[in-house]
Structure formats: C-alpha cells, structure tokens
Image (cartoon, rainbow, N blue to C red):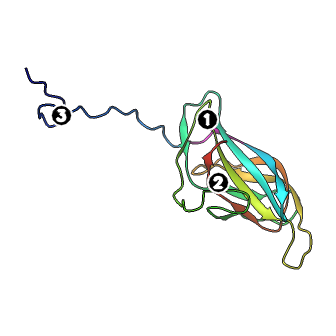
Amino acid sequence: MTSIAAGTGQPGESAPAQTSPSPAPCGAGQVIVGGTVMSPGMGHRGVRLSFSVVDASPPCTLSGYPGVDSGSGGPLLHAERTPRGYLGGLPSGEDANPVIVLDRTHGAQAVVEGVAFDDSGNQCPTYTDLLVTPPNTTDTMTVAARIGTCRLQIHPVTAAQ
C-alpha cells in the first residue's frame, strides 16, 4: 500500500508543516513601558526602555522604532531614529528591524542615547523623564529617567536581554 500525504497527492510527499499564527501587532493599552538609566561612557548618556505586555493582554508583536521626546528639564527634543549607536541598537551589518513577540515571559527593549555636551563643550540640560510611544501605537507614556543630553537618538526594539 502506498501512502499519499496531503499536498500534491504524490506518493511519499510530506505534509506541509502546521504553523501557529503569529500574534497580532500590539495595540492600544497592551504595552507597559519602563526605563533604566545606562552607565555613561565617553560623554554618552543612555536609557534602556523596556516593553512588556499588560497582565491581561494576549501576546502581541512590536517592530521598529518607538517615538521618543524629551520631557521635563529643558527644551523639547525629538529623538532621531538610528539603527545603532555608541550604547546599543541593532548589531553591525543588520539593518532589518526584528519582529519581537511580547508575552508574559518575553519582552522587548530599545536604547535611547545622547551626548552630555554640546559642540562647544557646554554641559547639556538634564531631563527627568521621556515621553515614549511604543512602535506602531498611539499610547504615549511618561517614563521617569534622568538623561543629560543636547540631542536624542532612538534605536529599534530588540528582544529583551
């Protein structure tokens, strides 16, 4: 007796692999954002943003760049989107934004960075919070984090470490 697998009906052909559907992109009210100040280096300052799902939320995905603006402490700054920088971002040679699944045990992170001195060597203002919007959402949250900078950069979300 010859077995015929699902597919084209040819003898011995294996059945197509069953894959579970990917979670939908994260939407309004699904993501919590936190921030941790990173150790400064060579005049660079940074904040590691963490993204996790709300307890009652089903898994969802994030990809791309969070929106980041400065909060209290100085003039309004809008973060420039860059794939990598001095303190983090995508690995060298990788430019595609990864798709990160957020669930109760897996999160995402993104690095905000800036420089502590302007082009004339003057110390930059110290901000006490950042306004953060997770990628592809409209939920802007205030994240308490101190960063002394004259300009901001944001790198894409990656898997939390």
How far separated are the C-alphas under marks 3 and 1? 37 Å
The residue sitting at 73% across, 58% down in the picture is 87
- Identify the mark at residue 106; answer none if there is no mark: 1
The residue sitting at 60% across, 42% down in the picture is 28
Quadrant (top left/top right/bottom left/bottom right) for the N terminus:
top left
For the residue labelled by badge 3, is the local secondary structure a helix, a strand or a loop?
A: loop
- Is tag 3's residue or tag 1's residue first in the polypeptide sequence? 3
- Kind of residue indicated by mark 2: Pro
The residue sitting at 40% across, 32% down in the picture is 20
- Kind of residue indicated by mark 3: Glu
- Along the line of sight, which residue is nearer the eye, 80 or 85? 85
Q: Does residue 149 belong to the magenta stretch?
A: no
- Identify the mark at residue 66; answer none if there is no mark: 2
Task: Write down the region rendered in magenta.
Answer: 26-33
Quadrant (top left/top right/bottom left/bottom right) for the C terminus:
top right
Residue carrying label 3: 13
135 is higher (above) or lower (below) than 28: below
How far separated are the C-alphas under marks 1 and 2? 18 Å
